[in-house]
């Protein structure tokens, strides 16, 4: 299966009064580059998060954001600081003993509003770690599915371009014999028009040399081999962007040679079209993992 390097994944979870949100975005990059945005309380998990991503992805610029908040349905997000409450109650009792009935008694709500008495429940990293890593795994799964869908589309496009190049190769194969014969005829006609005495044996030797220099069979055969290898790589799947990029270089080299050997405008046009198709494939391949 071919995977693109462009994708998105998102997952959420609630754990002991805390909400966890993980978002992952990825775009094409030559290597695997990870950018993490974590709350300070999760800094100790950075190494595990990086390792989990590296085991899943091979290439791409990956941006991971993890947020922690208070769950909307939490019933235990707040707790009483018992030590602080005891201190406040002791102070109130001391004031009451001195003031007697001249002061109104404090109610429970006023006591809870005293700074530090009511505080958010603290959750240890060991309690929330499984939920964070599980949420990360879910988001990574969505990212992979997204990259897979995009990769399937890219593979289809590349296969279409391969077929287009094969059509241009067939065009060259059908044009070359007649073009070569036409060149021979024109050359002989020019010699006759200039009234130059023609040494038939020497002319035959020159024509053989020309045929060897302008022969395209080897280049066309190599083009076919490279296209077959490209289809094999696409069918095999897995991370293959670098292999395909190397094949683009080889295809382009053969196309340039064909263009330089061209003896007919149809062959030149076909070679230019092949180069255009190769460039289109190269642009698509830049996004393949």
Image: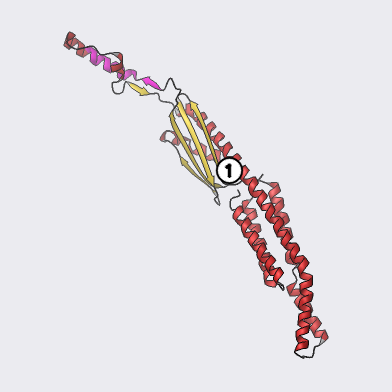
Residue nearest the observer in this picture, 97 or 77: 77
User: Was residue 99 drawn as part of the magenta stretch in this picture?
Assistant: no
Relative to 199, does residue 109 appear above or below in the rendering?
above
Would residue 68 be visible to someone looking at this image? yes
Would residue 239 be visible to someone looking at this image? no
| Residue drawn at x 52%, y 42% as measured from the top left | 25
x and y, in percent, of residue 267 in the image: 71, 69
**Magenta region, residue range:** 74-93
x and y, in percent, of residue 119 in the image: 35, 23
Q: Residue furthest right?
A: 201
Q: Quadrant of residue 188?
A: bottom right
Relative to 75, does residue 226 appear above or below in the rendering?
below
Residue nearest the observer in this picture, 207 or 263: 263
Residue corresponding to mark 1: 57
Magenta highlight: main SS:
helix
x and y, in percent, of residue 180 in the image: 77, 74
| Residue drawn at x 21%, y 13% as measured from the top left | 94
């Amino acid at each position: 299966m071919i995977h693109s390097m462009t994708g998105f994944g998102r997952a959420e979870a609630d754990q002991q009064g805390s909400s966890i949100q993980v978002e992952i975005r990825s775009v094409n990059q030559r290597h695997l580059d990870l950018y993490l945005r974590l709350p300070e309380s999760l800094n100790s998990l950075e190494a595990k998060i990086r390792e989990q991503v590296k085991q899943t992805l091979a290439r791409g610029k990956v941006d991971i954001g993890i947020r922690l908040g208070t769950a909307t349905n939490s019933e235990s997000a707040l707790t009483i600081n018992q030590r602080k409450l005891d201190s406040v109650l002791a102070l109130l009792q001391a004031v009451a003993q001195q003031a007697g009935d001249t002061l109104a008694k404090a109610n429970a709500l006023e006591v809870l509003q005293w700074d530090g008495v009511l505080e958010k429940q603290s959750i240890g990293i060991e309690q929330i770690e499984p939920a964070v890593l599980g949420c990360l795994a879910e988001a990574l799964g969505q990212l992979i599915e997204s990259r897979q869908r995009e990769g399937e589309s890219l593979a289809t496009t590349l296969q279409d371009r391969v077929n287009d190049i094969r059509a241009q190769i067939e065009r060259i194969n059908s044009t070359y014999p007649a073009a070569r014969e036409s060149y021979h005829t024109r050359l002989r006609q020019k010699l006759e028009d200039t009234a130059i005495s023609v040494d038939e044996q020497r002319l035959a030797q020159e024509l053989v040399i020309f045929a060897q220099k302008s022969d395209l069979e080897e280049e066309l055969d190599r083009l076919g081999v490279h296209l077959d290898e490209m289809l094999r790589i696409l069918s095999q799947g897995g991370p293959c962007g670098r292999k395909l990029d190397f094949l683009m270089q080889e295809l382009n080299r053969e196309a340039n040679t064909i263009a330089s050997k061209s003896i007919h405008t149809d062959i030149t046009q076909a070679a230019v079209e092949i180069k255009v198709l190769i460039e289109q494939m190269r642009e698509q391949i830049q996004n393949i993992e």
